């Protein structure tokens, strides 16, 4: 945790937000809230934090790309947990490509099904007054490869409410202010 402007870290703030949503709304679990306000409106039927408790859900092993571009599912970690005690706000959600595309389509078209138009627009506003701490994190090869795979880390990156922003765009790929998301499970998208 940092005071505003004193640092930046990709951390567990969204997990804290999930606990706050549970407390403020009275839902027993964050997943229950997500089902009501995201999954039902978008007809997402295969998205959960607890696949071990949901019949008919098959989990594919997590696969990552190594620095030599080889893929492996032989990992020294048991992430993500298929039956967590608490639902993470920033990790641990299992979904299908079909469900994931429903969410991304809703956000891309800004259709108001899960977020108001002004909320989606605010996701693309840079949140960091200075990107020096973000740039320092991106310079760590393992982190930079995860956050902006295949992209030069020495660009003008910033952070929006929905992901990393390429403030000066990515030549031949995306325009100024595009948002980029990847994540450990390779669910990469650019808007």
Image (tube, rainbow, N blue to C red):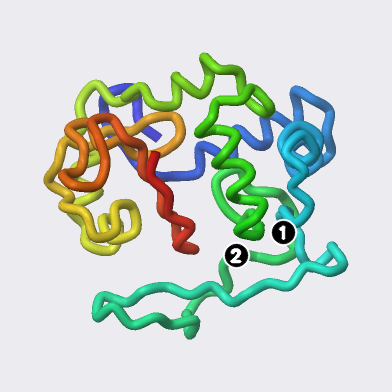
Q: Along the line of sight, which residue is nearer the eye, 95 or 184? A: 95
Q: Position of residue 14 (x, y in %)?
A: 55, 38
* Residues at marks 2 and 1, CA–CA distance in whole angstroms: 9 Å
Left or right: where 184 falls relative to 92: left
- For disc 2, the neighbor class at 10 Å (few under 14, some 14 to 19, many from 20) is some
Circle 1: element type: loop
Residue 135 in the image: above or below residue 24: below
Circle 2: element type:
loop
Q: Is disc 2 in contact with disc 1, using a CB cutoff of under 8 Å?
A: yes
Percent position (x, y) of residue 12?
A: 50, 43
Q: Look at mark 1 in the image and give the residue it sits on.
A: 84
User: Along the line of sight, which residue is nearer the eye, 153 or 6?
Assistant: 153
To which residue does mark 2 refer?
80
Camera-side residue: 169 or 63?
Answer: 169
Callout in the foreground (2, 1): 2
Q: In which quarter of the image is the N terminus?
A: top left
Q: Residue at x 22, y 62 (%)?
A: 141
Vertical side of 60 occupied by 32: above or below: above
Residue 11 position, x and y percent, is 44, 44
Q: Which residue lies furthest to the left in this view?
A: 154
Residue at left 84%, top 63%?
54
- Residue furthest to the top in view is 118
- Could you tell whether 1 is left or right of 20 in the image? left
In this view, 25 is above or below 101: above
Which residue sits at x=76%, y=28%? 23
């Amino acid at each position: 945790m940092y005071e505003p402007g004193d640092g930046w870290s990709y951390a567990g703030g969204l997990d804290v937000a999930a606990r706050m949503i549970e407390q403020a709304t009275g839902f027993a679990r964050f997943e229950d809230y997500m089902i009501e306000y995201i999954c039902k409106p978008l007809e997402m039927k295969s998205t959960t934090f607890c696949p071990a408790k949901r019949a008919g859900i098959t989990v594919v092993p997590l696969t990552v790309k190594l620095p030599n571009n080889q893929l492996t599912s032989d990992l020294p970690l048991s992430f993500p947990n298929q039956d967590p005690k608490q639902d993470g706000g920033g990790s641990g959600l299992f979904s299908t490509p079909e469900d994931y595309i429903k969410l991304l389509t809703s956000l891309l078209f800004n259709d108001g099904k899960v977020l108001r138009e002004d909320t989606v627009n605010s996701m693309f506003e840079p949140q960091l007054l200075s990107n020096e701490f973000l740039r320092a994190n991106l310079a760590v090869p393992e982190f930079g490869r995860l956050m902006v795979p295949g992209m030069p880390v020495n660009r003008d990156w910033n952070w929006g409410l929905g992901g990393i922003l390429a403030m000066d765009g990515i030549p031949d790929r995306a325009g100024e202010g595009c948002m980029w998301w990847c994540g450990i499970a390779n669910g990469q998208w650019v808007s």
